[in-house]
Image (tube, helix red, strand yellow):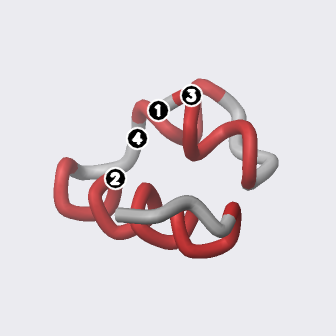
């Protein structure tokens, strides 16, 4: 979840409320936005 929080301004409470599927989606968005290679 830290990789998501570095890119997007989510609080721990908000991240904890996400489903596993949502976390996976947001993690991919964070990867794309950061420019990291897969």
Q: Is residue 18 left or right of 7 when viewed as pictured?
A: left
Q: Tell me, yes or no, whether the two marked residues, 4 and 3, touch with CB atoms within 8 Å.
A: no
- Tag 3 residue: 2
- SS assignment at label 1: loop
- SS assignment at label 3: helix
CA gap between label 2 and label 1 equals 8 Å
Q: Is residue 16 left or right of 7 when viewed as pictured?
A: left
- Tag 4 residue: 17
Of the image marks 2 and 4, the number of the one nearer the N terminus: 4
Tell which residue pokes out farthest to the left in this image.
21
- Tag 2 residue: 23
Compared with 30, 3 (above or below) is: above
Camera-near label (4 vs 1) is 1
CA gap between label 2 and label 4 equals 10 Å
Q: Tell me, yes or no, whether the two marked residues, 1 and 3, touch with CB atoms within 8 Å.
A: yes
Front residue of this view, candidates 19 and 31:
31
Camera-near label (2 vs 4) is 2
Residue 28 horizontal/vertical position (percent) = 41, 67
């Amino acid at each position: 979840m830290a990789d998501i929080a570095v890119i997007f301004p989510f609080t721990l409470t908000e991240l904890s409320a996400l489903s596993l599927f949502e976390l996976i989606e947001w993690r991919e968005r964070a990867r794309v936005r950061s420019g990291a290679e897969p």
